[in-house]
Image (cartoon, rainbow, N blue to C red):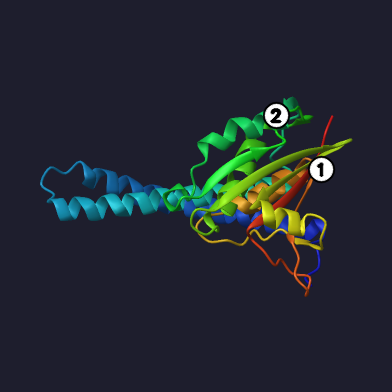
Amino acid sequence: MSRSQTPAERAASAKLLSLASHELRTPVSVVSGYLRMLQRDATLNERQRKMIDEADKACMRLAAIIGEISEVGKLDDGRMTLQSESLDLFALMRELAPSIDEAADRGVTLELYGCDSRGLMRGDRAHLKTAFTSIIRAVLREQPENAVVHVQCQGLGNSVDIAVGRPETIAQHHAGPQAAFDEQRGGLGLALPIARRVIDGHGGRIWSPAGADGTAAARTAVFITLPLS
């Protein structure tokens, strides 16, 4: 099991991420600029235009990842301060769920349960919305065809539990062994590492079900606990 980083190591890692994002941003901007100049060239044939358009999309994706690298560094060394405002976490779930259509082409659907009451807390609404959107998208994309995924909200005194997964998976693993949240997933950039840091920054916890060896056994369910006001 890997040990936790010391504050000095976290600061050094954050500085390295900041330097990397700064050094990468300039060449990406240059390439993107030239690609957009080519897109305005009226002499391009259809095949050439398609190739340039695909290259521009890839360049935009790379620019987004560079921005995420910078955000991770800022969260790690405290340069990004999470806002503290009054918000209803359950209302936030009701708002964002209809806009997430990940895996809809495979018949995967998303349903809310227990989110019709109130879950008042103080936090950064924008960052929490982005974090939960990323987490839910990650769970949805790893489901089989025609699966039904639940977002289950439950108030527990001074905290709230939010579980994301198929109902049978949630029931099986909710009170079982816990493992560190598996944030190393392809196709999502650094959205999950950022989401985990946002949850941590609000005094919450995020975890996955654990297997017999103590490692994350199922990516198809995620559990989050956050403190309420």
Query: Measured from the top left, where is residue 37 in percent x and y?
Result: 24, 44
Residue at horizontal 89%, vertical 35%? Answer: 157
Does residue 162 show up? Answer: yes
The residue that disc 2 covers is 116
How far across and down, in percent of the image, does residue 172 sit? 75, 59
- Indicate which disc, 2 or 1, sits on the residue closer to the N terminus: 2
Q: Position of residue 48 (x, y in %)?
A: 18, 54
Image quadrant assignment for residue 142 = bottom right
Is residue 128 shown above or below 172? Answer: above
Label pair 2/1, CB-CB below 8 angstroms: no
Horizontal side of residue 108 vs 126, given as left or right: left
Secondary structure type for disc 2? loop
Compared to residue 26, the image places residue 181 above or below, namely below
Left or right: where 135 falls relative to 33? right
Q: Quadrant of the N terminus?
A: bottom right
Q: Nearer the viewer, residue 59 or 31?
A: 59
Residue drawn at 83 percent across, 33 percent down: 228
Q: Secondary structure at mark 1?
A: loop
Answer with left or right where residue 229 lies relative to residue 10: right
How many numbered dots are placed on residues in this image? 2
Assess disc 2: are there few (<14), some (14-19) or many (≥20) residues with their C-alpha within 10 Å of its C-alpha.
few
Tell me if I can see residue 69 in this picture. Answer: no
Local crowd size for mark 1, using a 10 Å CA cut-off: few (<14), some (14–19), many (≥20): few
Q: Which residue is mark 1?
A: 203
Question: Closer to us: mark 2 or mark 1?
Answer: 2
Residue type for callout 1: Gly
> Residue reaching furthest right?
157
Q: Residue furthest bottom?
A: 213
Left or right: 225 in relation to 219: right
Name the amino acid, label 2: Asp
Is the residue 118 above or below the residue 205 in the image? above
